[in-house]
Image (cartoon, rainbow, N blue to C red):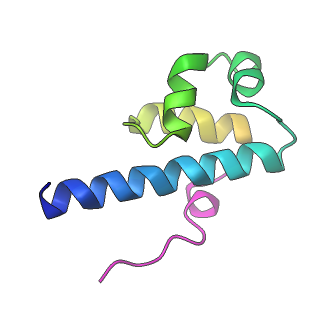
Amino acid sequence: MAAHEKYIEDNLEKLGQRLQELRKAKGYKNYEQFAFQHNISRSQYGRYENGQDLRFSTLCKVLKALDVTLEELFEGFEKEK
């Protein structure tokens, strides 16, 4: 695997973990409940939390549903050198 592919994969995984953390902090015990209540495909949202590809427009929809800013989403992400 090329270095840039590994970088993308690692960061998608971190993003998925962060989305899960934020969802749980908002009181949603499972991703299906959250997705259903916010009119997001449950299967697709489940893939996001598992670190699979995520379009920016969909990310914005998820953040709006979580009432979270981009800045809040990326809190705790380490800077890559």
* Image position of 60 (left or right of 7): right
Vertical arrangement, residue 80 with respect to residue 36, above or below: below
Q: Position of residue 67 (x, y in %)?
A: 73, 44
Quick one: quadrant of the C terminus? bottom left
Considering every residue shown, the one lying at the far right of the view is 27
Considering every residue shown, the one lying at the far front of the view is 1
Residue found 14% across the figure and 54% down from its top = 1
Vertical arrangement, residue 72 with respect to residue 50, above or below: below
Say whether residue 70 is magenta.
Answer: yes
* Image position of 80 (left or right of 47): left
Q: Nearer the viewer, residue 53 or 61?
A: 53
Q: Position of residue 28 (x, y in %)?
A: 82, 35
* Image position of 7 (left or right of 63): left
Vertical arrangement, residue 42 with respect to residue 55, above or below: above
Q: Position of residue 11 (x, y in %)?
A: 39, 57
Residue found 50% across the figure and 36% down from its top = 48
* Image position of 34 (left or right of 79): right
Residue found 55% across the figure and 18% down from its top = 43
Q: Nearer the viewer, residue 18 or 67?
A: 18
Q: Which residues are magenta?
A: 68-81
